[in-house]
Image (spheres, helix red, strand yellow):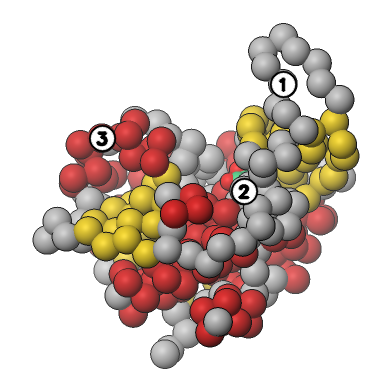
Amino acid sequence: MTTPLIAVLGSINMDLVTTTAIRPAPGETVLGHDFTMVPGGKGANQAIAASRAGAKTMFLGAIGTDVFAPRLRAVLTESGVDTTCLRTVEGPSGIATIVVDDSGENNIIVVGGANTAMTDLSTADLTAIAAADVLVCQLETPLATVTAAVHHAHVHDTTVILNPSPVQHLSDELWDHVDVAVVNTGESEHLGGVLDRVPHVVVTLGADGARHRGPDGAHTTVTGPVVEVVDTTGAGDTFTGALAVRWAQGPATALRFACAAGSLATTTLGASAAIPWRTDIDAVLEQ
Ligand code: RIB
């Protein structure tokens, strides 16, 4: 297998994570167990997942000039992600406030910070997208920039994997340039028939694995290993990054690899802290 070249355009946030037995209802105050800060952001998580799973990975995004910025940059470089296209913009980095309950489920609020400054693509960004085998995007970056990146990838025969999260309305033009959509069940229901425009749709099913629908309409479901869930934050991102790494080997192989990676990502607290390395994924697949 040749090492794939993956460009990830997306967000990078410092996740402020509180753990508690039960997430509070509106207007309710509850006592928590613990608090920690872990680098995250859907884009960074997906880039880290792709790199740790064995791809040569570039991250296209922005950090601020605040106290969190050095740690955000470091988690990318420590994971082997190329940060040539990582910008620093004056002001705060992206922040995510996350509450994780005892079942591992979460609520997340993202304040975009530096991510919102990604209003254009630099020459280096465009070069990275054109040279990549796969472009991976999500929707915590300004939509016009995602649209331009997807169009540029399409023109240069770079496979486009879009994780349309947080879910929102997208133009038909954008959808028509997406090769693979990765959604969870809620996003799939929300988007409905527009997903029919996309040749490959992958729906993540949590503990039940993932389902692929190809251009011929055929469905394949793949299950992952059974694990003890601590925190589901970033599991979908890990799945998406790992899927991109193996996409060239076909959907069945890619889903199996991604399900293993995504499952492992639920076994540790904190998005980037939980993303497995290639050896961990291979070990699970060999069991
Ligand atoms: O998908 C999980 C991620 O969503 C978190 O890391 C948080 O930063 C938000 O972007």
The answer to whether the residue labelled 1 contacts the one labelled 2, judged by CB atoms less than 8 Å apart, is: no
Label 3 CB less than 8 angstroms from ligand 1: no
Q: Is residue 120 visible?
A: yes
Does 238 sit left or right of 277 as displayed?
left
Q: Who comes first in sequence, dot 1 or dot 3?
A: 1
The image quarter containing residue 66 is: top right
Q: Please report whichever mark, 2 or 3, sits nearer to the chain's N-terminal start.
A: 3
Distance Cα–Cα, label 2 vs label 3: 24 Å
Asked if one can make out residue 200 in the rendered structure from this viewpoint, the answer is: no
Q: Residue at x 30, y 75 (%)?
A: 250
Which residue bears the numbered disc 2? 232
Image quarter where the N terminus lies is: bottom left
Q: Quadrant of the C terminus?
A: bottom right
Q: CA distance from mark 1 to mark 3?
A: 30 Å
Q: Residue at x 67, y 13 (%)?
A: 26
Query: Quick check: marks 2 and 3 in contact, CB under 8 Å?
Result: no
